[in-house]
Amino acid sequence: MPPAVVGTRTKRRLARRRLRQEPEIAISTLAFVLVAFLLVHGHVGASLQESWLHGPAEDAAMMAAMMLPLAGASARSVAQRSLRSRWARSVGEHVLGFGAVWFAYGIAAAVAVRLVSRVIDALLLLALVLTVAAAWQVSAPRRRRVERCGRLRTTPPTGWRAEVGSTVVGTQQALGCVTTCWASMLAMVAAPNPIVMGTVLAANFSEWAPGPDAIGAARRRRPAAVYLTLAVGALLLLAARPALSEA
Amino acid sequence: MLQRKAVSTEAAADDLAIYAEGVRVMRQRSERDPMDPLGWVYQSRIHGNSRGEERGPGEPVDWSSCQHGSWFFLPWHRMSLLQFERIVQVSTGEPEWALPYWDYPDASNVTIPDAFLDESSPLFQPGRAFRPRELAAPTWQDSGSFVAFGGGERERPVHRGRELGSVELNPHNLVHGLVSGDMASFQSPLDPLFYIHHCAIDRFWEVWLTLEKRRNPDKESWLGSSFSFPDPEASSGRRTLFVRDVQTVAAAGYSYDELTPPPSARERRVMARPSERDRTGMLAEMAPRRKDEDLELLGATSRGGTVRDRAEIGVASEALERRRSVLADQGPRGAEDIGPLPLFLRLENVGIEAGDASSMWNVYVQAGGEGERHLAGTIAPFGLAGLTAEGGRQTLTMDISHLSDELLGPAGALEVTFEPVYEDAEGEPFYDRAALYTTAE
């Protein structure tokens, strides 16, 4: 008996089904494309002063794009809790609500960082923001917020309230994320280049990655240690700057 | 290899006597030093506090670390029992001792073993108000996937998760609620019944694995997670166990005297109503063929409610017909072979302001508010008041597949009602939405 051959049509059908059942794939792809576009576009790495006129919007777009993958799991839950005829729509509406909140926070954070950087040195500002992020990372209020992460409100199954509901759930989900991770995201905006930005992001995500250390205290402390190390690095650079300039 | 025996059997008599001695020694340790990690009180605080809330500031890091409402529920409690067993073995000088398990068939047929009712025994715990009642039958044996059976998937451990597996909902929570007193709180290990109860739940996990096509997760986020417990022999005073070390009883180094699975909900129903056998065919053909980790919504209430309200769920007929036709295509003999449509009633984002697991409510379903009313499940809000106070909620899933032929008739709607198991129930659960699901393609 010849081995069963899976036809192209079947493969496409299975791929479509997987995309429908796992919206994380489409959302992560969208996030990757957005981040790549913004990096190629060349904004990231420009100095704060250079990017004053057009920077906040791009910084906010970068922040929203980087955070989009966090909407994957909740989008999947929202889709599963919707009637099949609304799966794709509910995911789109959810992502829209999620991205909008992060974009708004990104604008506020970028403007605030730029305003403050006019009166204090950018490296000092970065060190301060990173220290705040480290303190917030291990604080009790943040731990309680982390516990609440992932709690999704439900929506009516049909009608306009279902349409609005998916967006509102995305908004609420993002607000929960912002109140948990606002400090480290602020550090990303204050970061002078993609390497520091990427390190902050990786430290942030390491808390959520699968693996050992069940109770999670060390997991919470690890990103804080990274933020503090970066803060010390920023201060050392600041102190060494006159010598470097002379050299 | 150690063998755990049924508490009601003669063979377990010696094990019970050693258990009583172990409890006595551990209680003494706590009286001398309440912070002794091998003492009775400290061990109960590892599980949780009486309010079911998060660990408080300044408390040891291993307090309030039990895992509920996620797929870590079963492995964490297995590890906890293993370590408890080691403490009793060392405390009593009985290295071959094994914890007996409570061999109740279901929550409606629980009796407290005599040894735990003797007020002069260390196994007695005051404050119990045990009042047996008829509660919903368990459906854990019908759960086809580990997440449906043991709890929702989580990337990392969580003290109080949101998605209870079928075995945690029933009989785990129900027996906690039935015994009441300390057993109904998150500091339930204060009652020696806790350990034989969890030994029963641990055995159900192994029984479930003997059923056809049941498997543990193979994801690293589950297998690679670890938990640390006080240990009487380790030089550091602690022992860390990985989930992969305890994923079967053989891997963990012990066995059970007996692993016969109970009948499924559908088998019980057919046995109770022989006429159904003619209609649906042989029992052997009625084994569930579903993969119930991915569910598809059939209908839901448009708003939330409390257990004092009637909830009406409108069923989307399009979704129902399409799902039926897909299932019929999958059966080797078409529609005749598919049996009842898999059907799950979900109460989403359930909370409760006050009360413990003894504030139990039975959940009934009825087609279109007419015809026979069926007991779909029982809510026993174990630790839910503390979770609710801190902003959390739980989702409770009840497998009602064995009722789907009756419920999904021409009415196009399902009515859900609630009744308190005890009239003096302290709290009234509320929910964001009541919804009806089937399995996804």
Image (cartoon, coloured by chain):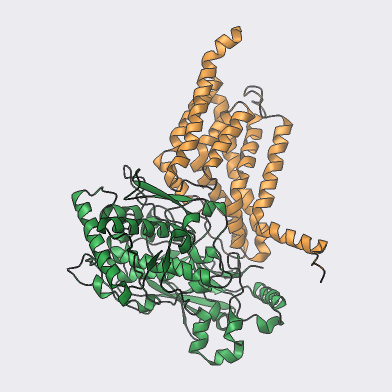
Instruction: Give chain B's shade.
Output: green
Toward the top, the furthest residue is A246
Residue B105 visible to the viewer: yes
Task: Tell me the quarter of the image containing the C terminus of chain B.
Answer: bottom right
User: Hey, which quadrant is residue B129 in on the image?
Assistant: bottom left
Q: Position of residue B149 (x, y in %)?
A: 50, 66
Please tell me whether residue B68 is drawn above or below residue B406 in the rendered image.
above
Q: Position of residue B362 (x, y in %)?
A: 41, 75
User: Hey, which quadrant is residue A48 in on the image?
Assistant: top right
Residue B73 visible to the viewer: no
Q: Position of residue B331 (x, y in %)?
A: 69, 78
User: Hey, which quadrant is residue B354 in on the image?
Assistant: bottom left
The residue sitting at 40% across, 77% down in the picture is: B105
The residue sitting at 58% across, 78% down in the picture is: B287
Closer to the camera in the image, A181 or B42: B42
Q: Position of residue A229 (x, y in %)?
A: 50, 27
Quick check: B29 left or right of B186?
left
Quick check: A230 left or right of A45?
left
Please tell me whether residue A128 is drawn above or below residue B92 in the rendered image.
above
The residue sitting at 32% across, 63% down in the picture is: B97
Instruction: Give chain A's shade.
Output: orange
Toward the left, the furthest residue is B120
Task: Tell me the quarter of the image containing the N terminus of chain B.
Answer: bottom left
Closer to the camera in the image, B376 or B414: B376
Closer to the camera in the image, A132 or A158: A132
Quick check: B67 left or right of A84?
left
